Every structure is written in C-alpha cells, then in structure tokens.
Amino acid sequence: MKPLFQFLRESQAPQDLQRLVLNIADICKTISAQIREGALAGVHGEAGTGNVQGEQQKKLDVIANDLFVEGLSEAKTVCGLASEEMDHAVNVPGGARLLAAFDPLDGSSNIDVNVSIGSIFSILPAPDNLDTQGEMPSRGADAPPIQDAHFLQPGQQQIAAGYVIYGPSTEMVLTVGNGVYGFTLSATTGDWLLTRGRVRIPAETTEFPINASNARHWHPPVKQYIAELLAGKAGERGKDFNMRWVASMVADVHRIITRGGIFLYPADLRDPSKPGKLRLLYEANPMSFIVTQAGGASIDTVRNMLEVAPAGLHARTAVVLGSSSEVERVRALEIHSAKAL
C-alpha cells in the first residue's frame, strides 16, 4: 500500500503543501495516541475553560489545539493559522505562504462515551502565495503579520482540505484538489497508507444524518423534506430512508464519503439572527470541498457553499451536503418556499 508521502509526491502538489499535509498528519497521529489512551492518560473530562463561541472545552479540545498550534508554528509550514478554539488568527513569522484553519477536535461531546470524533483542516493560500514558478517561498520576517481578514476567503479558494476520524481505526480523508483519497494509520509501522482509491459519492442515497431533536424549530422547507424521507415507500419518494446521527460532523460525513447520504444541519427559528450552527471557515468549507471533489454537492440550503466567503473567523452557516440529487431537492424546496412568501 502506498504511503502518504509517496501519494503527495506523485500528486505533484507544491513542495510546501506536501510538507504541510505531512506535518498535519504527524500532529493527528499524536492526537490519535492521546485519544487511544483515554482515561488511562487522564485526558477525559472538562477542561474548565470555554472557547470564543462560549462552548465549554474538554481536556482533549485544549490538548488537540495546542498540538496543532505548536506543531504548525515550530515547523513553519504555514505563515498563519486559525482555530475553533482561539479568538483570533496566529501569525507565524517566516512560515510558508499557506494558511491553515482547523477544528482540532470535532464532536468532543462524544469523547467520554468513546464514540468516533475527528479533526478537520482547511488549507488556503496566503496573500501573494504564488510566484511565477508556482512555488510557495516563505514570507520574510518583515512581512506584514497575518490577520483574521486574510482567512476570509470563499471555500473555492482552498488548496487542500481533509479530516481525520478517530474510530476503530484512524483514517485521514484528503483532497489536494484532484479527487478524494483515504489513508489509514498503521498501528504497526506508524505510517499513513493509502486504503481508499479515488472516492465517488453516489448521486442517489437512502441515508440522512440530522439532529431530529431540533425538528420543532426547523424552517418549513426542511420540515417538508424530512417528512418526505420519513414517509418512506408509502410517500411521494417511493422508497425507505434510514436516519443516522452521531453528533460528530466528521463521523457523519465519513459515512457519506463511504457509502453516500445527505448531511443536514440547517438554521432554525430559535434565533433568526443566526444563519446556522456550524462554522463556515473550518467546518463547512473543508467538508464541502471534500464532498464536491468526490462528486457530491454542498449548499447553505440555497447557495453553493464554496462560493460563500466567511464574514468573520468564526462565522456560522447552515449546511446541506452529500449525494447531489438529494442536495438539489433541498435547494428546490427552499427556493419554492421563498417564492411563495
């Protein structure tokens, strides 16, 4: 089986991008080891702190974030980084002309119950990232510092994206812009080995993850769509659907990458000022890039997700992604509802 470094070399990705992906892979290997030890290493439970979103942090949230920040900063494989767990972007003087945004530990509510969790990352170009030879030289020490605004790029600007799922095995799903591939971490050698060839999400599906406890708050088009699915063979769709919900975006999207499906985390009526729960920069955008590279689709219920630029580092959005025919059905219901108003 082909190791990750060989895959990257054969992909002809720029050298700095290859180094950054390998850097992230090493960081996630360390996170995987911490998760595997669990209570034996004293990493379960609350950290007693909160992040910028006002969410209570788990110990592993803090550990994973520190590993990402320290690992990327010391290796200088980026000139700036942003995290769900930090208020603002971090400048890395002398780093490569790449930006990394990440959710260091997605689904952390599942940590203490030993259910799959993950890490998500997005790689963006830094300002003036390419010279005429297509290389990515380091930014000089006197270069203007990277700030939050440098990260506010639409998802279609991403150079690469991926996630690591910490489950029965540890697997990385990665795109560098030429398809989606999966790598499994060998417990024997410590290598990341190619175990999924080019991934294609089927256009049709019969599975959907959604947090049904929020059903009473959904907007009418989402209620109508889910009602169609729940009606099964007796309804207008003429087939049965199965609902799955892990409460970890990585785990729920990984099922879609593996066998198709549609993931929904819509906005709802509880607070009309909030466009959704998931963060655009380091959750929705990288997952949307992966899904579309695998032949699926992704929208914020109407707009193509990758065309939307974040209004801020921690801007939130509604997310619908997965098998293209189902995503388009949701979009059609939303547009019809808007015209009827």
Image (cartoon, rainbow, N blue to C red):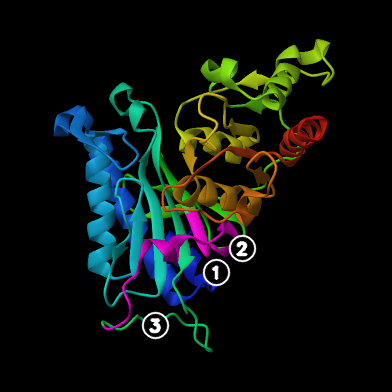
Query: Which residue position holds label 2?
Result: 178
Query: Which residue position holds label 3?
Result: 137
Quadrant of the frame with the C terminus? top right
Q: Element at badge 2?
A: loop
Q: Position of residue 25 (x, y in %)?
A: 36, 56
Above or below — where is 48 with respect to 279? above
Q: Give whichever of 192, 66 is nearer the camera.
A: 66
User: Quick check: is 154 in the magenta stretch?
Assistant: yes
Which tag is nearer the camera, tag 1 or tag 3? Answer: 3
Which tag is nearer the camera, tag 3 or tag 2? Answer: 3
Residue 129 seen in the current view: yes
**Bounds of the magenta span?**
142-161
Left or right, 255 with respect to 45, comes to right
Going from the N terminus, do you reach mark 3 or mark 2 first? 3
Left or right, 238 with respect to 197, comes to right
The residue positioned 22% from the left and 50% from the top of the image is: 66
Q: Position of residue 333 (x, y in %)?
A: 77, 31
The residue positioned 29% from the left and 71% from the top of the image is: 76
- Circle 1/circle 2 CB separation < 8 Å: yes
Q: In the figure, residue 265 lies in which quadrant?
A: top right
Q: Element at badge 3?
A: loop
Give the residue type that dot 1 points to: Ser
Q: What is the spatial separation of the Cα atoms under label 1 and label 3, in whole angstroms?
A: 19 Å
Please rate how many residues cluster around mark 3, counting C-alpha atoms within 10 Å: few if below 14, some from 14 to 19, many from 20. some
The residue positioned 35% from the left and 56% from the top of the image is: 82
Residue 171 seen in the current view: no
Give the residue type that dot 2 points to: Asn
Q: Position of residue 153 (x, y in %)?
A: 52, 62
Left or right, 288 with respect to 34, comes to right
Give the residue type that dot 3 points to: Pro
Query: Which residue position holds label 1?
Result: 11
Q: What is the spatial separation of the Cα atoms under label 3 and label 2, in whole angstroms?
A: 23 Å
